[in-house]
Each structure stands twice: as C-alpha cells, then as structure tokens.
Amino acid sequence: MMETALATGLAELGLDLEAPVQRQLCRFAQAVLEQNRVMNLTAITEPDQVARLHLLDSLTLLKTADLAGKRVIDVGCGAGFPGVPLKIACPQIDLTLLDSLGKRVNWLQTILPQMGVQARCVAARAEEAVSACRETYDIATSRAVARLNILLELTAPFVKVGGYVLAMKGAAAREELAEAKNAVARLGLQVEKIQEFPIGGAAHGVVVLKKVKPTPPQYPRRYAKIKQSPL
C-alpha cells in the first residue's frame, strides 16, 4: 500500500525514481513506523498516508531546487523528514540532520548506516549549533518546526550568501509569509517564490527564499526570545 501510494504520487509530481530507490524510501518509512512504537516520531501511521505526507511531501523539494552536490541542513529534522528521503533520492547531497532531541538523533545515527544512508547527525538546538557552522550551507530546509517568522531566524544564519532557505509549509504558506516580511528583510533574505504541490488532496507549499546578504551577527537570538518577540 505504501509502495503503491508512493509510485502514484511520484508520477503525479513528475519525479522519476528507480525501483530500488523507491524500495529504500519505503524501508526507511517502515523503520520510522517500527520505532514509533517505542518513541514518539510521527502521528501519521497509515502506510499510504506515510507515503503521501512524509515521503512525497519531502520529495517536493527536488522539484523546487537543484540539490545535487549541495551542502544541505535539515533544521529540526525530527524522524528525518525531509532530509533522509532527499538523500535517498539524491545521494549527491551532503546532508546534516539537526534536532534538539538527543534520542531522535541517536536513533537516526543507528538506523541510517543500516539503510546505507550517509548523513551528519547533530543533537543541538539550532540557535546554539549555528555558531560552529554559520553561513556555510548552500541550503537550509525545515518542516513543521515553527511559524515562518520564527523559523527564518533559526535557519537563515546557516546559509551562505547566494544560498537558499526552503521552508516547507501547508495551506497557510502565503499567510505566514505576509506575517514574516520583517524577518525576511532583517535576516538578509529575499522571497523568490512559493511553489505549491497538491498531494493527496492537501496543499503543500514550499517558500523559497534566497540569501542575498549576510545575516546580522545578533541573529539568531535565544529561542525563548525569538518566540516571545518574533521579528
């Protein structure tokens, strides 16, 4: 059921992935569901919904930007979405998975080598981790972490000038972008487009922002401060 839903969705998105790649994507998704029995990784447990709302949703980024050969950081990666499916589908990505929850990161460090997936797994808060790798990534992406005006302060500092923030959002993408205009300007970003993908009847939007100048050194602030007074 997962395999069928994945194959159907890939055709709808116009993505051509070979059968072994599709099988590997489903293997990873099954591993998430198995681990979910002992660790809170996902509220979505129906195999066809996992294919649509985790795998296909993640893979929309392949239609949004050229990721091959790029340094990509998945900020607040959770169970590994979107980063792991992207790496499986495009092994040329140099991937870092960042999450503040150590047990999730430990699980990813254990399972990914078993899947033949190479990624750097880092357990840290985004606003603390950035000090060691500020403006060194081509692309920062994130999904289901925070509203856009908060999320941009956590992701933009990782990205080098000329790189991109790819913020994965649902139907509220345009509303959140309107709310984040000040954050976009202050953080050295410029909106390039919102790309929308209908998957399983639901709207999935990717907000594409280009880094046009360095992010001022005072950002990111501590998370409590970001949340208390978003830019």
Image (cartoon, helix red, strand yellow):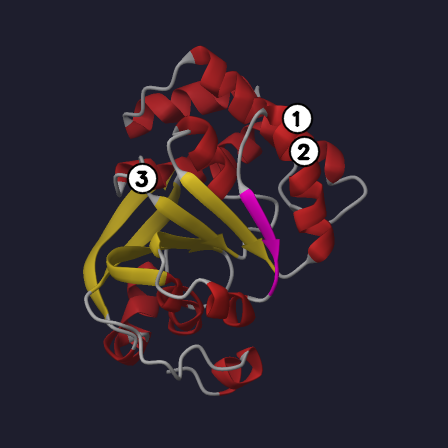
Residue 111 x/y as whole percent: 67, 33
Residue at the limit of the structure toward the top, as seen here: 19
* Residue pointed to by mark 3: 67
Q: Amino acid at mark 3?
A: Leu
Question: Cβ–Cβ below 8 Å for labels 1 and 2?
Answer: yes
Residue 138 x/y as whole percent: 31, 52
Q: Amino acid at mark 2?
A: Ile
* Residue pointed to by mark 1: 114
**Residue 7 forms part of the magenta stretch:** no
Q: Badge 3: how crowded within 10 Å, few (<14), some, or many (20+)?
A: many
Q: Main secondary structure of the magenta part?
A: strand
Q: Amino acid at mark 1?
A: Gln
Q: Is residue 181 above or below residue 138?
A: below
Residue nearest the observer in this picture, 58 or 21? 21
Distance from the alpha carbon under mark 3 to that under mark 1: 23 Å
Residue 112 x/y as whole percent: 62, 33
User: Which residue is depicted at the point 42% across and 82% down?
Assistant: 230
Distance from the alpha carbon under mark 1 to that under mark 2: 5 Å
Q: What secondary structure is marked by label 3?
A: loop
